[in-house]
Image: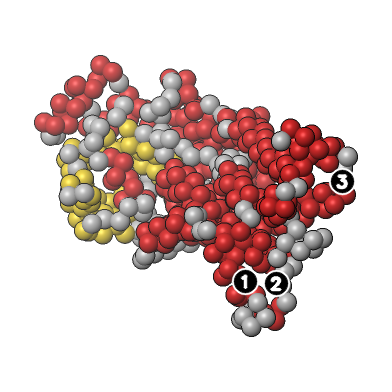
Amino acid sequence: MSAILPLRLEDVSFAAGGRTIIERATLSLEAGPSTIILGANGAGKSVLMRLMHGLLAPTTGRVAWSGEGARRRQAMVFQRPVMLRRSAIANVTYVLEVAGVPAAERERLAADALWEVGLRDLAHRPARVLSGGEQQRLALARAWALHPEVLFLDEPTANLDPSATREIETIIKAFDAAGTKIVMSTHSLGQARRLGDEVIYLHQGRVLERAPIDRFFPHPASPEAAAFVKGELPWA
Amino acid sequence: MLDALVSGLQLVATLDLQLWQIVGLSLAVSLSAVALASLLGLPLGAAIAVGRFPGRQAVIVVLNALMGLPPVVVGLVIYLLLSRAGPLGAFGLLFTPGAMVVAQTVLVLPIVAALARQSVEDAWREYEEQLRSLGVEGARAALTVLWDIRFSLLTAVLAGLGRASAEVGAVMIVGGNIDGVTRVMTTTIALETSKGDLPLALGLGMVLIAIVLVLNAGAHLIKEAARRRYG
């Protein structure tokens, strides 16, 4: 099976309700480095990721994966995960069933995924009564079970406290170590530094800058990114 | 009035056989109709909620309007369809409990479907992105949401049951209110009241209300338990 990366965005724009949200983005995402999509609220981070993941269709331009069957070889974790009203493990076996994994293997794969995110002991708890951090870990277990080539994360820790955030970041690093390409949006500069290899900086729907982490933070090229880095630092 | 009430209570308390046959048939007819209507109406409502097709808004308006179908009109149409000369006359269903189930199913179906459509659509707003991200679409998405909100759908089913157990016009026309065959609680109450036998009418009225109350209480308990269990 050939890789689905690189993912190419060619002159992609997205408009809704007469407002342009993403303006002429041209990008290529390669396997390997973890990509952080950085930008202020309303910069278009979530929309850009949804365009990449295929949840939104570009108004103009093209989003193209390299390999076949890209749809099933990527996963996304949302800011607020949606859990089905069933046990934690049943939420994982459900996605395995959808992915066409034979029934005999689902339980084992799901148990492995729950173990990976530290939810083994809560496997039979109803998913909806888990805490916010546990639900987000369960969302990551759902993705883990699918072994995606690319994992999109849309501000996965925006609603979580510091300790839950640390747990989520550890799991994201495990995905990276297992060879999954990470594409994550965040507005936390600290998190971008901890998890990212490169930054795509978005400002008012436009990709202003793309640079390796260790160059972006000391020397942002655009005045907008410089202001963002400076303004955000005290709270990072 | 008070005498009638007391005699009615006595009839109920002494488990008058004739009375209980009537109660039994009522329950059998209405529960069958609600079961059939739910089997068809819940997936139908979910499909309309999740589906995107031309004329969808019109379908929703019509479906909502059908919730107010007058029972006598439904009874009349089913009567015409099932009568010997009608297109479905060959089944010989007219004036049998089967005909009453058909009529009540038609009456209840739009209620269940319209209320399910609303519930599934509300839930769909929450689930859509997540399910599409997982590659779940179409019928599978509709069934996943339907199953996930199954306890809130009890409300739709109960509304249908309320309609079925309370209506008199449709079962009267297609059933014919034949003693021992198609006589149910509501038709008996109508008949006995017009004959002046108030104790039986009142007794049945009390039973009818009690049954509806018990079913609703049961459904409420199930929903509460589910809410605590599944969140």
| Chain for disc number 1 | B
Q: Do the CB atoms of the residues marked 1 and 2 lie less than 8 Å apart?
A: yes
**Residue A3 in the image, given as x and y percentages of width and height:** 42, 57
Indicate which disc, 1 or 2, sits on the residue closer to the N terminus. 1
Q: Which residue is mark 1?
A: B79
Q: Quadrant of the C terminus of chain A?
A: top left
SS at circle 3: loop
Outermost residue to the left: A223
Query: Disc 1 marks which amino acid?
Result: Tyr
Indicate which disc, 2 or 3, sits on the residue closer to the N terminus. 3
Q: How far is disc 3 from disc 1 in space, using C-alphas?
A: 32 Å
Q: Which residue is mark 2?
A: B94
Q: What residue is rendered at 31% in x and 26% in y?
A: A188
Q: What residue is rendered at 48% in x and 40% in y?
A: A82
Q: How far is disc 1 from disc 2 in space, using C-alphas?
A: 7 Å
Query: Disc 2 marks which amino acid?
Result: Leu
**Residue B202 in the image, given as x and y percentages of width and height:** 72, 42
| Chain for disc number 2 | B
Q: Do the CB atoms of the residues marked 2 and 3 lie less than 8 Å apart?
A: no
Q: What residue is rendered at 79% in x and 53% in y?
A: B22
SS at circle 1: helix
Q: Which residue is mark 3?
A: B16
Q: Quadrant of residue A219?
A: top left
Local crowd size for mark 2, using a 10 Å CA cut-off: few (<14), some (14–19), many (≥20): many
Local crowd size for mark 3, using a 10 Å CA cut-off: few (<14), some (14–19), many (≥20): few
Nearer-the-camera pick, B160 or A2: B160
**Residue B169 in the image, given as x and y percentages of width and height:** 61, 59
Indicate which disc, 3 or 1, sits on the residue closer to the N terminus. 3
SS at circle 2: loop
